[in-house]
Amino acid sequence: MERLAIEAVRGGVDGRPDVHAKPAMNSVEHLIVRAREGDEEAFRLIFERYSRPIISFIYDMVNDRAHAEELTQETFVRAHRHLAALREEAKFATWLFSIAKNVARESLRTAHSRSQKVSLDDEAVQELSDERPSPAGALLDKELNEVVRRALAGLEEDKRLVFTLKVFQQRSYEEIVEITGFSLPKVKTDLHRARTELRRRIRPYLGVQE
C-alpha cells in the first residue's frame, strides 16, 4: 500500500481504468465494496481518482510539495486501514478529505511544537499543473503564486483550512462542515475573514491602492 501511494503520487503507476469496463463497475461505491473485500486493484483506482485533489489540498495547507506527497501517502494508508468504518459510500470524498485534514493538521502542530516554520523555498511554490507556460509567463506565474502562498501561509490555520476547501477544492458549505467539524456560521465567518485578509496581503503586489 505504501509503495503504491508513493509511486502513484509521483506518476510511477499507470492508473488508467479499463476502457471496456461498464461505468457502474468503476463507480466509487462499487470500488469501495471491492476494496473492503481485499481487492487492491479497486483501491488503486480509488487512489488514482482522488490523489490529485488530496495532494493539492494538503499542499495548500503545508506549503511543501515533498511533505505533501508524504502526507497524501499517509492519508490513503489510513483510509485503506479504516475503510470498514465508512458508513456512507456516497460521502467517500468528504470522509477522505476529513482524514487528509487530520493528517495535515497533525503535521502542522508537530512542526509548531518543534518551533519549525513552513518552508517557502522555490520547491514549495512549484505549480501542481502539468501545463508548461512560456518562460516569461512562468516567471510571472511563479512570482504571483509565491505571493499568494505566502499570504495563505500567514492565515490562521482554521481560516486557511476553510479557504482551501471552499476556493481551491470547491467543496460545498455542507461538506466543509462535515470535513472540519466547524459550525456553518464559523465556516462562513472564517471564509469571509480569510478572503478579506488575503486581498489585503496581495493588494500591494497587484498595485491596487487602498
Image: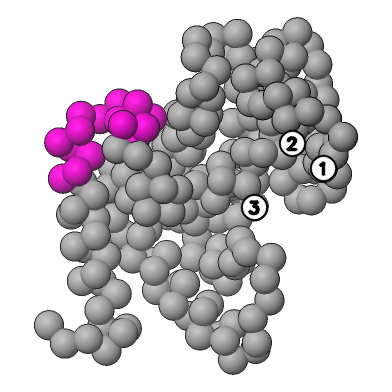
Q: Is residue 140 magenta?
A: no
How is the protein colored in the picture? Answer: one colour
Q: Earlier in the sequence, mark 3 or mark 1?
A: 1
36 lies above or below 160:
above
Q: From the image, state whether disc 3 or disc 2 is nearer to you.
A: 2
Q: Earlier in the sequence, mark 1 or mark 2?
A: 2
Q: From the image, state whether disc 3 or disc 1 is nearer to you.
A: 1
Mark 1 Cα-neighbour bin, 10 Å: few <14, some 14–19, many ≥20: few
What is the spatial separation of the Cα atoms under label 1 and label 2, in whole angstroms?
A: 15 Å
Picture disc at residue 5? 2
Q: From the image, state whether disc 1 or disc 2 is nearer to you.
A: 1
Q: Position of residue 128 (x, y in %)?
A: 61, 61
Q: At label 3, which amino acid type do we have? A: Ala
Q: Quadrant of residue 39?
A: top right
Picture disc at residue 66? 3
Residue situated furthest left in the rendering: 210
Determine if residue 114 is in view.
no
The residue sitting at 51% across, 45% down in the picture is 58
129 lies above or below 7:
below
The residue sitting at 16% across, 45% down in the picture is 189
The residue sitting at 84% across, 48% down in the picture is 12
Determine if residue 46 is in view.
yes
Residue 173 shown left or right of residue 186 in the figure: right
Q: Nearer the viewer, residue 106 or 204?
A: 204
Mark 2 Cα-neighbour bin, 10 Å: few <14, some 14–19, many ≥20: many
* Residue bearing mark 1: 16
Mark 3 Cα-neighbour bin, 10 Å: few <14, some 14–19, many ≥20: few
What is the spatial separation of the Cα atoms under label 3 and label 1, in whole angstroms?
A: 24 Å
Q: Nearer the viewer, residue 204 or 38?
A: 38
Q: Quadrant of residue 32?
A: top right
Read off the magenta span: 174-189
